[in-house]
Amino acid sequence: MEVLDFLLDPLRSGIDRRALLELAMAGSLCGALGFWIVTERLAYSAESLSHGLLPGLVLAALAGAPLLLGAAGGALAAAALIAFASRDARIGPDAGTAVAVTGLVALGALLALAPDSPQRLEELLFGDPLGVTDGDLLAAGLLLVLGGAALAALHRPLGAVAFDPGGAAAEGVRPAAVRAALLVLLAAAVAVTVQGLGALLVLAVLIAPPVAVRDYARTPARAMLAGAAVAVAASVVGMEVSFHAHSAAGASVALALCAAAALGAGLRPLRGAARRGARPRSPRRAQAAQGR
Amino acid sequence: MTAIEVEGLAAAYDGAPVLTEVSFEAAPGQSVCVLGPNGGGKTTLFRVLLGELEPVAGRLEVSGRPAYVAQTERTRLDFPVTALDVAVMGTLTHGRWWLPASRSDRAAARAALDRVGLADQAGIRFGELSGGQRQRALLARALVQDAQVLLLDEPLSGVDPASATLISGVFQELRAEGRTLLVASHDVESARTFDLVLCLNGRQVAFGRPDAVLDRATLEATYGHELIVLEGGRGAVTVQHHEHGHED
């Protein structure tokens, strides 16, 4: 009973309950979406987008506007700037993107560190799940419902494009349109989830769950469900740690997510060894063993 | 009556022409072998026929939407799908892409897998199949589409003999059903078994029956220094330079 009390302690606080609800709703969508982000090798794009929207967040905070609005505007502006910078063939897309994102983060920091800035920079960078508003919860709920519906509707085209873009195009699927839809979903997920985890840590909930379940799920649907489950479980663990250790909630959840990814990756060789051990012996090896 | 009719076709990427002067036609039930070196325009021709690339000149008519069988190298082996899932992808041409595959879609996919001899491997991950089995799974994906015209990109390249025999048998059945096959290949000798041969090297070098087209002069014009003519002129092989990810 003592252990149960210990575990349920955070839920007795209304603030923690709301934080957990926010993280569970947004995290489960991000955990599922992350499978396609990792499969389409868009992790760097996700990182660039989540970091590059910082000026939008800061401007919204300075103007007293909803952070969601700032995040959405920041994501759009960041996407446009990154697309422009990455087109310069002289320096290459990676370097162009890196310069654009660094510039945007610096601009955000410059704005946030102004003397009349009402919100602390660290909350925008590292998030504040304990400070979620009713509006944030509504946005997370809408993200889960609408984003989930979009993922379900796009499931077959996404699979066909990921498996073989040429074959998908021949079947009437437009790979560029499918990838554009995926990027729109990514931007929406980042804009909503950044409220809880901040511009620097939001990437963890998008990338860590699919990395954790990679190679264990036999179908994309199972990988998405498992990714969502990992995101929710890591949110619970992170909030428990934050409550009992008095650590920053956003960072605790992000660390729990990364630990899940490391655990999933670390167990992979053991799973491979177990499979090899379970494999039937070849006739030659069986004969050799009998002869011993 | 023709299944494919192409006249004076030219295609370009970013304004630079890569294929010109292509004119040929094929009737229902005919098979056409498309020969040419890497970069000769085989894949570009397929992209135009599939409607992915707008021709910059000429006209073409294709009977319905063609089905396409890509090279297995262009697929993601680490993507978690089974042979059945791959065959089910072919039902995307039926529309309703936003809905899960229906029971009849899955039944059609199973029937196609059965036709290519993969009924027992339906539940195996695509990446765990042998090269020949993967090619057969991709063929099943095309069969599900029930297309009148099938475009196949080197379907017998690197395939084990058993799979090659099975795939060739399916080709014969498709021709008997009145379907038209366009098969991109590097194999000059196997081209002799087709009804027609189309030789490309940035432009159309020749088109016609194998016995009229497959002579030394035409093959040299098609392959240049990539062609090795065997002793006595009884046969020829091509030297292939595979460049992954490079448009053909």
Image (cartoon, rainbow, N blue to C red):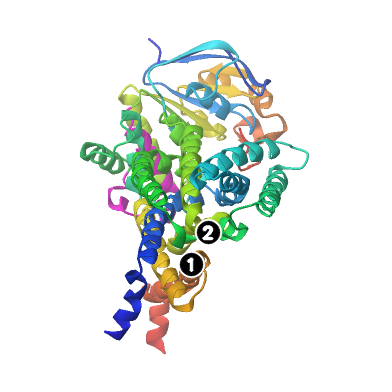
The chain letter under disc 2 is A
Which region is colored magenta?
A: B117-146
Per the image, the residue denoted by label 2 is A127
Q: What x and y, as percent, mark residue A44?
A: 60, 51
Q: SS at mark 2?
A: loop
Distance between mark 2 and mark 1 Cα atoms: 8 Å
Q: Residues within 10 Å of mark 2 (few under 14, many from 20)?
A: many
- Residue type, label 1: Ala
The answer, for residue A205, to whether it is visible in the render is yes
The answer, for residue B75, to whether it is visible in the render is no
Left or right of A146: which side holds B225?
Answer: right
Q: What x and y, as percent, mark residue A150?
A: 37, 40
The residue drawn where x is 49% and y is 45% is A68
Q: Residue furthest front?
A: A116
Per the image, the residue denoted by label 1 is A249
Report the magenta stretch's main SS. helix
Corner quadrant of residue A124: bottom right
